Amino acid sequence: MNTTVQHALIQLKKQLKHLRYYRDIHKQVPTGKYEPLPQEAVTAYNMNRYSGPEKYICFAPFTNLFFDIRGKVVACNQNRMYVLGDIHQQSIDDIWNGEAIKEIREHLANFDFSLGCNKCADAILSKNYHGLPALSYDSTRKVHPHFPVRMEFEMGNTCNLACKMCNSYFSTTYKKHFKDEEAAQPLPYPENFAEQLRPFIPHLQYTKFTGGEPLLIDIYYKIWDLIAEINPACGIHIQTNGLVLNNKVKSALERGKFYLGVSLDGATKEAYEKIRLYGNFERLCQNLTYFKEYCERKGTILNFPFTPTRETLYEVQKFAGFASRYNAYAFFNVIWEPHSMAIWTLDADELEKALAFHQSQNIEAISYLETHNKLQYDFFIKQLEQWLKNAREREQRYADFEQYSNDELIDMLTNRLIEFEGGTPRIWINNEIIPEPELYFRKKFVLKLKENPAKTRTTMIKLCTYDTERVYMEMSSFSHLW
C-alpha cells in the first residue's frame, strides 16, 4: 500500500470517529464553572490525533498515575503543580480514588486546562499537535472502571550525564559538575514500594520509567521483574540516554517487552557532546544500532525525543533524518527551563530569523516513518510561529516595567512567587517550607545583580512578562545559571 492511499484511509477513519464522538467533542460546556479552550481548537486537535477524535481531550487522569521524584503523584510529568497525592502519606488506591484526581478529570472532560495543564493548552493553540504531551496517553485510552491501566515512574536521580538543560534534582552528575551544593535532594521511596504495586500490575497495559538514568536505578529492576512475573504482556517504556548497555541491561531487556526511547539533543557529535556533558556520540550510535535490532526483533518501538535548544536551533532539520536511519520515530520536546537555553524566551528578532531559516528547509519523505518524522518537524515550525507571536506581545510590555527600580522589580517578582504557592512557598523537590520566603527569593535576585547588574535587570524585566509558573520553575531550579 503506497503512502497516499495509507494517509487517505487514516483520514477516512478519523472522519468516522469524529461522527462517533461528535457529542463529546461539541458539547456545551458551562463556562461559569469551567474555562474551556475554543471549540474550533478542540476540533482541530482531535482531527490531528494519531488515532483520530476521542471521547476525552486528555486520557492522563483517567488512565495514568505518575510517581515523581519527590514522592508526589500527578496525572502526568508535564503538570507537576497539581498534585493528586503523596506516596509517603497515602496509599496508591486512595490517590487513584481521591477528590483531587476527580476534579482534574472533570476539568479536562470539559476542555478546561486551567489546573496546571497550560503546556498542552499552549501546544493546542499553537497548532503544535504532535508536540502535545497529552497525545502520548491516547495509546492507553481504554479506561478501566477501578484501576489505572498505565503507570509512569520517576523514582531516582542517579545519572551518568550532566545535560545542560537538566538540574541537580534529576541528575547526580549535574549537581557535581555545576557545583550546585545548595540543591536539596529528593526523599527516597519507601523500601516496600515495589510490593505496593503488586495488586495493580495485572491491570496495567503500559508503564514508563525515567530518571535520572533509569538503567542505573536499582528499584526499577525489581519492578521490571514483577511485571515479567505477573503481567508479561504489559509494555515497558524506558526513557534512557542510551549510553548504559551492559549484560545486566541486556538480560533485563530480554525478560520483558521493552519500548525504548532514547533522549537526544543533537544529530552530530559536536552538538550532542556540547549539550550532553560526559556523553560519547560514537558509543551512543553503537548502542542505537543494538536498540534498533532489539525493537525490530521484539516487535516494539524505538523513538528519539529531541529537545531543541538555542544551541541546536539551526540543526533541528537534521533530527528527522537521523531518527529515520535507525527506524525510530522522532518527537520534539519543548524545553521551558532554563530560560538561558529555551527557544521560547528568545527575542522576537532572533525567533523571526530562525523561523525564516526553518521554513526554507526541504526534508524528503517517502516512507510512512519518514513522513511521520517530517511532520514532527513541521509542527516544530508551527510552534516557532506561536513563540514569535508571543515574543512580540511580551516585548510591547517591557516599557511597562522599565520605569521601575531594581528593588521594585524584585518586590513584584518576589510577591508573585510567594502568592503562587498560597503564601507558603516550599522547596519544590522535598516540599520543605521556606522559612523566610521574601528574604529567600530577594537574596537570589540581589546576588545576581551584584554579579552582572545590566544583564540581571534585563532578565528581571523579562521575567515580569512571563507566566508565574515559568518564573517559579526558573527561580526554583535554574537561577544559578543566569
Image (tube, helix red, strand yellow):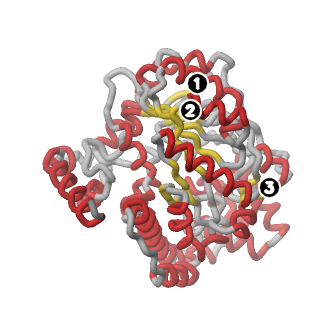
Q: Quadrant of the C terminus?
A: bottom right
Q: Amino acid at mark 3?
A: Tyr
**Quick check: can you spot residue 160?**
yes
| Of the pair 16 and 173, the residue shown nearer to us | 16
Q: Amino acid at mark 2?
A: Phe
Circle on res. 278? 3
Q: Secondary structure at mark 1?
A: loop
User: Alpha-carbon neighbours of circle 1 within 10 Å: few (<14), some, or many (≥20)?
Assistant: some
Mark 1 lies on residue? 87
In this view, the mark in front (1 or 2): 2
Q: Is 38 situated left or right of 447 in this image?
A: left
Among the 4 quarters of the image, the one containing residue 164: bottom right
For marks 1 and 2, give the CA distance. 8 Å
Q: Where is residue 29 drawn, in percent x and y?
A: 22, 47
Q: Quadrant of the N terminus?
A: bottom left
For marks 3 and 1, give the CA distance. 33 Å
Q: Amino acid at mark 1?
A: Ile
Q: Secondary structure at mark 2?
A: strand
Q: Secondary structure at mark 3?
A: loop
Return the disc, 1 or 2, that comes first in the chain's sequence: 2
State the residue at coordinates (47%, 22%). Answer: 231
Q: Is residue 156 above or below residue 204?
A: below
Q: Is residue 302 above or below residue 384?
A: above
For marks 3 and 2, give the CA distance. 28 Å
Among the 4 quarters of the image, the one containing residue 283: bottom right
Mark 2 lies on residue? 67
Return the disc, 3 or 1, that comes first in the chain's sequence: 1
| Of the pair 330 and 395, the residue shown nearer to us | 330
In this view, the mark in front (3 or 1): 3
Q: Is 419 situated left or right of 479 in this image?
A: left
User: Alpha-carbon neighbours of circle 2 within 10 Å: few (<14), some, or many (≥20)?
Assistant: many
State the residue at coordinates (48%, 24%). Answer: 232
